[in-house]
Image: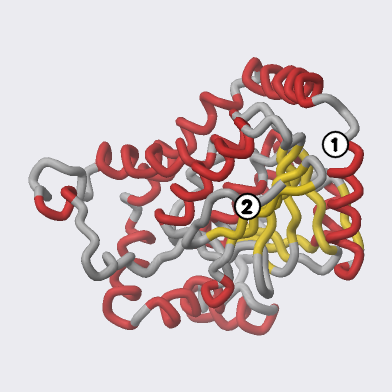
Amino acid sequence: MTNEQRYETLIVEKERGRARITLNRPEKLNALSRRLQQELRAALFDADQDTRVHSVILRGAGRSFCAGYDLTPERRREGETDTRDDYPEVYRTGQAFDDDVWRMEDAQRDRMTVFDMHKPVIGQVHGYCVAGGTDLVLLCDIIVAAEDAQIGFPPVRAMGGPPAHMWTYHVGPQWAKYMLLTGEFVSGRDAERIGLVWKAVPGDQLGETVEELADRMAMVHPDLLAGNKRSVNLALELQGARTMQRLAAEMDARMHASPAMEDWRSRNRERGLKEALAWRDGRFANPEQRRAWQQEHWPEGPREPSTT
């Protein structure tokens, strides 16, 4: 099996009954650009069509699996044309609620390939798996993480919510609410404990563990793998999983209308992304900073309990 197609943002290898798809923007910690998401969809469909492939391994190059969505605007390459730039009045570039939902659903169609394709997908998580990285990896069929991986969705602190929602289906309502009401991270080790990932292993054993899992799937005919994956996914659909993805996109758009989001946009526009992220997450960093924030915003301190 050989790599038959070249991608700008991915490395795709095929051998021994598996396709390894590596997110390949290590200088950006594999942040998800629109180009990467579109190429990923194409690579996943190609693996799904290839009768030699039994399973797909989805992983990231460099120091982390994925640092989330790329929040910097994409620029066209020299000589590249795109009719959407020539006709802005007819394509969705506005900030209306429906424009927002439409754009998120457009990206969601790319990610849902992981869920919809017949072949099983194994997520291999190391380093950071943040925000959009969780939107992607939680659609995988089995996730293996390094014990010291860090998994979370900190944008819930100021920017909205996940435009995809598999959290409740993995960990139940209590842990899903903890993750999405605080934006805190969990380690790979704790992610295994709560059921967010199938297994957590020492970092130097991560690749070996994933390859062994792919070895097992390579001994099962793809028709059987597909039937059993789809049975489980249909059970999730009967619990509303697919509908929930559409609702998550709409809920995120609703939260984008919050004053908190406008605060974020202003800071990002005026002070830059780095300072905006520091503002979003700094007060959560440690107890001292949390106390300092509380003292600034609630200087009167805690109220005495009522005796009446």
User: Residue 77, image x and y in percent?
Assistant: 28, 68
Look at the image and tell me whether residue 73 can be seen: yes
Location of residue 29 with respect to 183 vertically, above or below: below
Given the image, on which type of amino acid does mark 1 rest? Answer: Ala
Look at the image and tell me whether residue 175 can be seen: no
Q: What residue do we see at 33% from left, 83% from top?
A: 271
In the rendered structure, the answer to whether residue 41 lies left or right of residue 115 reads: left
Q: What residue do we see at 47% from left, 40% from top?
A: 110
In the rendered structure, the answer to whether residue 111 lies left or right of residue 199 reads: left
Q: Which mark is residue 201?
A: none
Pointer 2: what residue? 3
User: Residue 189, image x and y in percent?
Assistant: 87, 59
User: Residue 11, image x and y in percent?
Assistant: 60, 59
Q: For the residue carrying disc 2, how many other residues have a C-alpha within 10 Å: few (<14), some (14-19), or many (20+)?
A: few
Evaluate if marks 2 and 1 touch, with contact meaning CB atoms under 8 Å apart.
Answer: no
Q: Quadrant of residue 35?
A: bottom left
User: Residue 188, image x and y in percent?
Assistant: 81, 60
Q: Quadrant of residue 239?
A: top right
Given the image, on which type of amino acid does mark 2 rest? Answer: Asn
Q: For the residue carrying disc 1, how many other residues have a C-alpha within 10 Å: few (<14), some (14-19), or many (20+)?
A: some
* Mark 1: secondary structure: helix
In the rendered structure, the answer to whether residue 270 lies left or right of residue 61 reads: left
* Mark 2: secondary structure: loop
In the rendered structure, the answer to whether residue 132 lies left or right of residue 263 reads: right
Q: Earlier in the sequence, mark 2 or mark 1?
A: 2
Q: Quadrant of residue 201?
A: bottom right
Q: What residue do we see at 53% from left, 50% from top?
A: 5
Q: Which mark is residue 218?
A: 1
Measure the alpha-carbon separation of dots 2 and 1. 18 Å
